[in-house]
């Protein structure tokens, strides 16, 4: 594959880098979107596509800077030096963006000077390291590496597992079929970000509740159903009464049926002066609301 990427000079971990990530889908976002992320935020929740969407549009900032994360960051330079000794490549961190998919970026742990070899470094736990020893990239890291390969355009890159002083290099081949699926999933997610349209929630987006909560949820659901039925009945009665009134103001018993008028809504789409004007910048902050439905998972 030809090198398709461009390299950004933004420093990983900087405030500028954190802001930049809001405008892209990064490699670490890929496992979340592919439904294999297993790592939790500090509040105990697994990060889901919905939480990632809230983060990208600026209404949520999940903190996952726990002891394990801090340890991984601290040990990364040590692991990088071990990788360099084992592989023979001198590498440095870099941020790359895909040249033809504008929302894709990857913060690489290392890439060599002639940009031909990249590495993803993980300071792994015993279970993940055991998989690497067997020549396998753990499932929750596989989307991340393939996302990086998609941005790079390379045929292969290294996954480096480091655990208690032992390093293992797994060479990962480009999986074109998987990358195509990954990009399609990411495109659908990015459409949700651009259009402020929430992605479908998963079971991990919900906190399990019991008894009293269920009682009130069921009650509210039934009330909403009755309201919906009454609204349908309201429309039927109104339509029938209008037919019986022959378009005239009518009185019967204690009731009046009268016509009232108000101004129509403005059709902004047909205002010549607004043709070609980007109205999105005038949009107010997203509005949140709650509703009770039957579960689908």
Image: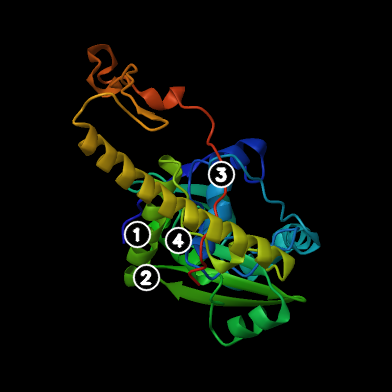
Q: Position of residue 64 (x, y in %)?
A: 71, 56
Q: CA distance from mark 3 to mark 4?
A: 34 Å
Determine whether label 2 and label 1 are within 8 Å by CB.
no
Q: Which residue is mark 3?
A: 289
Q: CA distance from mark 1 to mark 4?
A: 12 Å
| Secondary element at image label 2 | helix
Compared to residue 269, the image places residue 9 above or below, namely: below
Q: Residues within 10 Å of mark 2 (few under 14, many from 20)?
A: some
Q: Which residue is mark 4?
A: 147
Mark 3 or 4: in front is: 3
- Counting residues from the start of the chain, the first of labels 1 and 3 encountered is 1
Q: Which residue is more in the foreground, 71 or 186?
A: 186
Residue visible at 66% across and 61% down?
216
Mark 1 or 4: in front is: 1
Q: Which mark is residue 178?
A: 2
Residue visible at 38% across and 23% down?
279
Residue visible at 54% across and 42% down?
22
- Counting residues from the start of the chain, the first of labels 2 and 4 encountered is 4
Q: CA distance from mark 2 to mark 4?
A: 10 Å
Compared to residue 2, the image places residue 255 above or below, namely: above
Q: CA distance from mark 1 to mark 3?
A: 29 Å
């Amino acid at each position: 594959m030809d090198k398709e990427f461009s390299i950004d000079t933004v420093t990983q971990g900087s405030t500028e880098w954190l802001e930049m990530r809001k405008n892209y889908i990064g490699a670490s976002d890929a496992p979340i979107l592919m439904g294999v992320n297993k790592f939790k935020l500090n509040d105990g929740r697994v990060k889901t596509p919905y939480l990632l969407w809230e983060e990208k549009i600026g209404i949520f900032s999940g903190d996952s800077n726990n002891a394990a994360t801090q340890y991984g960051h601290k040990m990364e330079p040590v692991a990088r030096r071990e990788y360099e000794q084992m592989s023979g490549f001198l590498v440095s961190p870099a941020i790359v963006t895909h040249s033809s998919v504008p929302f894709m970026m990857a913060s690489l742990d290392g890439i060599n000077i002639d940009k031909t070899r990249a590495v993803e470094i993980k300071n792994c736990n015993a279970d993940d390291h055991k998989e690497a020893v067997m020549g396998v990239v753990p499932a929750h890291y596989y989307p991340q590496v393939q996302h990086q390969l998609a941005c790079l355009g390379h045929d292969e890159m290294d996954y480096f597992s480091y655990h208690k002083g032992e390093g293992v290099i797994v060479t990962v081949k480009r999986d074109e079929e998987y990358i195509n699926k990954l990009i399609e999933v990411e495109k659908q997610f990015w459409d949700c970000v651009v259009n402020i349209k929430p992605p479908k929630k998963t079971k991990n987006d919900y906190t399990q509740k019991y008894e009293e909560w269920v009682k009130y949820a069921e009650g509210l659901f039934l009330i909403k159903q009755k309201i919906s039925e009454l609204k349908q009945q309201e429309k039927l009665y109104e339509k029938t009464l209008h037919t019986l009134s022959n378009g005239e103001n009518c009185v019967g018993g204690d009731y009046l049926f009268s016509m009232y008028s108000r101004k129509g809504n403005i059709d902004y789409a047909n205002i010549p002066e607004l043709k070609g004007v980007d109205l999105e910048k005038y949009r107010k902050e997203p509005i949140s609301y709650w509703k009770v439905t039957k579960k689908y998972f």
